[in-house]
Image (cartoon, helix red, strand yellow):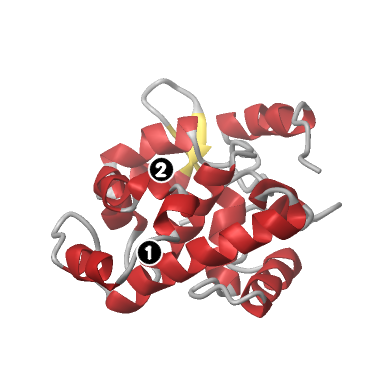
Amino acid sequence: MSGSVMGLDGRLRCRWCIAAPEFLDYHDKEWGVPVVDDIRLFEKLCLESFQSGLSWRTILAKRESFRAAFAGFDFRKVALFDEADVTRLMADAGIVRHRGKIEAVINNARRACELVEAEGSLAAFVWRFEPVDDEARPQSRSTSPASEALSKELRRRGWKFVGPITVYAFMQAMGLVNDHAEDCVMRSEVDRARANLRRPS
């Protein structure tokens, strides 16, 4: 679902945000707003991996349960999870009970700790993959050269469930690209936020 649609307030927004009632708030307050906080970046990578094969609506509805189950996505805490935690999580009806994805979050938390030790922060690492002068039409693709490069590097470092489609959705949501429709009311706001952002280094 691409393009834009007129909202009840008379403002144009990305068409996808009318697909479910809870999408509007997510669209206006989160999607595309640049993020440089390591915990939020890690959370989003995890949630996007859980979404694979499912709808974002399913994941968004369970987000608070995911946060409770995975220690607020504090990767330093999740890195200490063991088999007993996997068993606990597999019994948690509040999340998506997929053993491979649960184990991937724990693995990726350990890899995130290694990455922060090597690179300074998760934010500094992922923002190096921000595309420059990308002229693609908004919401016209599911991957990009930048998402393919970031996915490849994460997988080289041992991360799991971080294919280029998952990573591109992460980059859209975390503001590494502005993929709001050209006439969406949020596009200019995200442009301003990105222009004023102090990139991590």
Tell me which residue sits at (26%, 69%) in the image: 86
Residue 176, given in percent of the width and then of the height, sits at 68, 48
Q: CA distance from mark 1 to mark 2?
A: 17 Å
Using a 10 Å C-alpha cutoff, classify the residue at mark 1 as few (fewer than 14 neighbours), some (14 to 19) or many (20 or more).
Answer: some
The three-letter code of the residue at mark 2 reads Cys
Side of 170 relative to 17 (left or right):
right
Say if 111 sits above or below 188 in the image: below
Q: Quadrant of residue 181?
A: top right
Residue 184, given in percent of the width and then of the height, sits at 57, 35
Name the foreground residue: 104 vs 48: 104
Check disc 2 and report its element: helix, strand or loop.
helix
Side of 134 relative to 180 (left or right):
right
- Badge nearest the viewer, 1 or 2: 1
Question: Which residue is farthest top?
Answer: 9
Using a 10 Å C-alpha cutoff, classify the residue at mark 2 as few (fewer than 14 neighbours), some (14 to 19) or many (20 or more).
Answer: many
Q: Quadrant of residue 157?
A: bottom right
Say if 126 sits above or below 167 in the image: above
Check disc 1 and report its element: helix, strand or loop.
helix
How many labels sit on residues?
2
Tell me which residue sits at (41%, 20%) in the image: 9
Residue 95, given in percent of the width and then of the height, sits at 23, 58
Side of 3 relative to 177 (left or right):
left
Residue beneath disc 2 = 17
* First along the sequence among labels 1 and 2: 2
The three-letter code of the residue at mark 1 reads Gln
Quadrant position of the N terminus in the picture: bottom left
Say if 123 sits above or below 89 in the image: above
Which label number is shown at residue 51?
1
Tell me which residue sits at (48%, 74%) in the image: 161
